[in-house]
Image (spheres, rainbow, N blue to C red):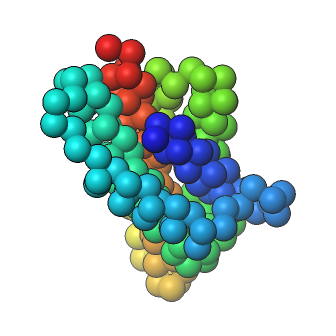
Amino acid sequence: MQESVLIYCVALLNHIKSILTNTRDGKRADLLRMQVALDDTHEYLDKIELKGSTDANRERMLALLHALDYLQRLHERCEEDEDRDITARKTADLSSIQQSLISAIDDVLKKIMLANRGDIAVRSRQVELDITELVDPMRDNIASSVANGRLDVPAATDCLEAMRWLDRVCHHISRISLHIQQAVLASGK
C-alpha cells in the first residue's frame, strides 16, 4: 500500500513540475487513469480491518489514508484549468513562488527515489512556510497595481487565482510528505 501511495505521489509531482516548467517531456500523468487508481486504492484501504492490529500498524494505515486524501486533493488541483499554471509561469511576481515550488518538488522526488523518505516533510514544509509569507505581500502588490492602473482587474484576478493555486499545491505537497514520513516512521516501530 505504501509503495502505491509513493508511486501516485511521484506521478503527480512530476506532472506538476511538467506543467510549471511547460515541458512536454512525457512526465505528465494520465489524470483520468490516476483518478481511477486513487479511487481503487481508497476503496481497498476502506476494506482493511484494523481490529487486533498493532498500534504502529494503525498509525501507518492512518498516515497512508491521510496521504491518499491529500493526493486526491492534489489531483483535483491538477485537473483545474491550466490557465492558472500558465499565469504562474508568465507573471514575474509569481516566479519566485513557482521556482521555490519546482525546487521543492525536485528535492522531494530525489528523497523519495533515494528511499530517504524519513525526512521528505522537512523540505516541503519549509517551502510551504516560505510561500505563505510571500502570499499576503504579493496580494497587496497586485491590488496596488490595479489601483495604480498598471494592471487591469481581469489580469489581477488571474494572478490571484494562480497564486492561490500555487499556495494550495504547495500545501497539499507538504501534507502528503508529512503523512508519507509518518507512515515510514510507523512501519519502523
The residue lying at 21 percent from left, 38 percent from top is 50
Q: Give the answer, above or below, for where 189 lies relative to 174.
A: above
Q: Quadrant of the C terminus?
A: top left
The residue lying at 58 percent from left, 73 percent from top is 32
Looking at the picture, tell me which residue is in the foreground, 162 or 124: 124
Q: Position of residue 60 (x, y in %)?
A: 32, 31
Q: Position of residue 77 (x, y in %)?
A: 48, 66
The residue lying at 66 percent from left, 67 percent from top is 30
Task: Indicate left or right for 95 with 4 as reference.
Answer: right
Task: Indicate left or right for 37 with 135 as reference.
Answer: right
Quadrant of residue 175 within the rendered picture: top left
Q: Give the answer, above or below, for where 119 lies relative to 154.
A: above
Q: Position of residue 3 (x, y in %)?
A: 54, 38
Q: Give the answer, above or below, for where 40 lies relative to 172.
A: below
The residue lying at 42 percent from left, 76 percent from top is 147
Which residue occupies the extreme left position in the image? 51
Answer yes or no: is residue 128 visible. no
Q: Position of residue 89 (x, y in %)?
A: 67, 62
Numbered label tally: 0
Which residue occupies the extreme right position in the image? 25
Task: Indicate left or right for 113 with 139 as reference.
Answer: right
Looking at the picture, tell me which residue is in the foreground, 163 or 15: 15
Looking at the picture, tell me which residue is in the foreground, 120 or 98: 120
Answer yes or no: is residue 169 visible. yes
Task: Indicate left or right for 100 with 60 as reference.
Answer: right
